[in-house]
Structure formats: structure tokens, C-alpha cells
């Protein structure tokens, strides 16, 4: 209880954030609610803090009362940050979730909630975070280890994901290109695609069909994001709308992508995900000639990869 009373002070250094996360995991529902009340009004700044973010994620992860989580913490994240004193308000402000999605640490809240995996998407969390966010278990009266939260973790995440859905889609629609070019944002974009396939596919296809598509294909981070998006389509159990949506309106952009080795990596992933794309590339004599010429030159790795995919 004393830690709970000093939530904001305790969670600033990493040891304090770990301690508060532990308290949230093993506290009764009443004390979890006290932690959320202490964080209310400071949810964004705490989540964006270099150490304290882990405590916010843990509180949201283990709290069964998802309605209180929405009211006390998530609602604040969906409000625009106030403009600096004396400055003019931005007539076209970024979506409030954008800075969270593009933060190395804060984005992990979105990655946790968007993931459809049974537990944490471990590829996005470091060993310390995985240790702090590990399942909280305690012995019941029979001596059996049981979770400290009653609700199924997947159910909690699904309820919070539904609450955030419209805002996540609005952010992706407005900022797909910016997310793709950012390391943290790219991960969020991939998970958003897995979670909300049709809507996010449309946003990505729109970004790839725009005037700045060539820059995305050749960007050192964006081309990896796009590659992961298409490979995620290949792994989707029920398929994905992205390849078809992209090919329907942006076939000319495939040719533009093949102007660079990085773009060739993206096209190779597209062809892995879509037999239609593979057939269209193989049927385009000019593109096949380009791939053949480029795979023997400098910076040829992307073209070599594409040639191998087309050959299989």
C-alpha cells in the first residue's frame, strides 16, 4: 500500500518501476484501481518515460476491470497532447497515438494489445521486460499455482483492442508512411495489419500508391517494414487482403520498386505472399529483363532474392 500511495515517485527509476509492476501483478483489485487512479492524468507521460513505461504496461496487462483501464488510462492516450504555451495550435495535428506507436518503449503497449498470440509477442520484448511481464502466479488454498487475475489474458486484450480499434485504424490511415519509416512504428504497423487486415491493407496500399512510394521502397527502414507486412500475409491462416489490394491499384509501383535492390526485397516478399503477383512479374518481359540485368551488378542481393523466388 505504501508503494501504491507514491506511485508516480516510485516508478521513475527502473527498480521502482519493477517494484510497482510487481505490486500491480500481486495486488488485489482495489489496490490495482488505486494505482490507476494515481496514474490518471499522467498516463501518457509515464508511458513515454524511459523506465516507468513498464509499470503502465503491467497494470494494463493484469487488470481485469478493462472498463476502468479505458476510463483512467487509455482515454488519456487518445486525447491530443496540449500545444506548448504561446504556440499556435496545429491545424492538422498528428493522431494522438502516433508518438506512442513511434516510441521504442511506449509502443510495446500497442504491440502487446494488438498481438493475437497467446502470451506476449516475445520478439518485441527484451529479457528484462519479459521477466517483469511474466505470468503472475500464486498458490491457492489447495497449493496449486493459479493466475492472480481471474479473466483470461486473451479476453482482456480483446476487450481493450476493441476499445482502441477505431483510433488505431485512424492513426494507420493518416500515418501509414510515417509508421513504415520508423523502427518502432513499423512493428506496430505489422501487428495492426495482422489484427485488422482489410482496413490496414487499404491504408498501406494507399501509401504505396502515392507519390512518395519510391521513397518508401528505398528507405532503409520502410522497405523492411513492407517486406514484413507481405510476409505476414503469407503466414496469415485466412490469407490477407494486402497483396490483392496493392496489385489492384498500384501495379505501376511494382515497377518503381524494382528501381532499387531494397525495393526488389519488397517485391520478392509480395511474390511469396501472392501467386497472382508472382505470375504478373514473371509475365512482364521488361521486368524479368531488368531483374536478370540487375542481379549481376552492384547491390544485387535484392534482385538475386527475387530471381530465386520467381524460379521456385
Image: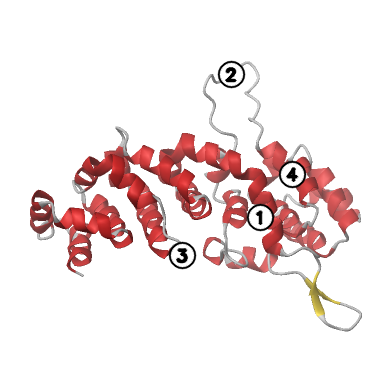
Q: Are marks 3 and 1 in contact (CB under 8 Å)?
A: no
Residue 66, numbered label: none
Residue plotted at (37% across, 38% down)? 207
Image spot of residue 172 (x, y percent): 49, 40
In terms of depth relative to the viewer, which is nearer, 154 or 43? Answer: 154
Cα distance in 3D space between marks 2 and 4 = 27 Å
In terms of depth relative to the viewer, which is nearer, 51 or 175? Answer: 175
Please, what secondary structure does the residue beneath circle 2 have? loop
Residue found at the far bottom of this picture: 143
In terms of depth relative to the viewer, which is nearer, 6 or 264? Answer: 264
Q: Which residue is mark 3?
A: 237
Q: Is residue 210 left or right of residue 102?
A: left
Chosen colour scheme: secondary structure
Mark 3, residues whose alpha carbon is within 10 Å: few (<14), some, or many (≥20)? few
Cα distance in 3D space between marks 3 and 1 = 19 Å
The mark lying in front, picked from 3 and 4, is 3
The mark lying in front, picked from 1 and 4, is 1
Q: Which residue is mark 2?
A: 89
Q: Is residue 36 visible?
A: yes
Image spot of residue 110 (x, y percent): 59, 50
Which mark is first along the chain, 4 or 2?
Answer: 4
Q: Which residue is mark 1?
A: 158
Which mark is first along the chain, 1 or 2?
Answer: 2
Cα distance in 3D space between marks 3 and 4 = 30 Å
Amino acid at each position: 500500500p505504501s508503494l501504491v500511495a507514491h506511485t508516480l515517485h516510485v516508478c521513475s527509476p527502473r527498480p521502482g518501476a519493477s517494484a510497482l509492476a510487481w505490486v500491480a501483478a500481486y495486488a488485489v483489485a482495489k489496490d490495482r484501481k488505486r494505482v490507476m487512479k494515481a496514474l490518471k492524468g499522467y498516463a501518457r507521460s509515464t508511458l513515454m518515460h524511459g523506465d516507468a513505461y513498464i509499470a503502465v504496461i503491467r497494470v494494463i496487462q493484469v487488470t481485469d476491470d478493462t472498463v476502468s483501464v479505458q476510463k483512467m488510462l487509455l482515454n488519456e492516450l487518445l486525447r491530443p497532447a496540449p500545444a506548448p504555451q504561446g504556440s499556435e495550435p496545429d491545424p492538422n495535428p498528428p493522431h494522438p497515438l502516433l508518438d506512442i506507436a513511434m516510441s521504442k518503449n511506449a509502443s510495446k503497449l500497442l504491440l502487446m494489445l494488438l498481438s493475437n498470440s497467446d502470451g506476449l509477442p516475445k520478439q518485441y520484448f527484451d529479457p528484462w521486460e519479459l521477466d517483469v511481464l511474466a505470468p503472475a502466479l500464486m498458490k491457492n488454498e489447495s497449493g496449486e499455482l493459479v493466475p492472480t487475475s481471474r479473466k483470461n489474458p486473451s479476453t482482456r486484450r480483446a476487450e481493450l483492442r476493441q476499445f482502441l480499434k477505431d483510433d488505431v485504424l485512424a492513426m494507420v490511415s493518416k500515418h501509414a508512411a510515417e509508421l513504415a519509416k520508423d523502427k518502432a512504428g513499423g512493428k506496430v504497423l505489422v501487428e495492426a495489419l495482422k489484427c485488422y487486415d482489410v482496413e490496414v491493407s487499404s491504408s498501406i496500399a494507399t501509401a504505396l500508391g502515392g507519390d512518395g512510394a519510391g521513397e518508401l521502397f528505398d528507405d532503409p527502414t520502410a522497405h523492411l517494414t513492407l517486406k514484413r507486412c507481405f510476409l505476414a500475409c503469407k503466414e496469415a491462416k485466412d490469407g490477407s487482403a494486402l497483396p490483392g489490394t496493392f496489385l489492384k491499384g498500384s501495379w505501376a509501383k511494382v515497377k518503381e520498386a524494382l528501381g532499387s535492390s531494397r525495393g526488389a526485397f519488397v517485391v520478392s516478399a509480395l511474390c511469396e505472399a501472392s501467386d497472382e503477383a508472382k505470375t504478373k512479374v514473371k509475365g512482364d518481359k521488361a521486368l524479368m529483363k531488368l531483374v536478370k540485368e540487375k542481379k549481376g551488378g552492384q547491390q544485387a542481393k535484392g534482385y538475386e532474392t527475387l530471381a530465386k523466388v520467381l524460379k521456385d
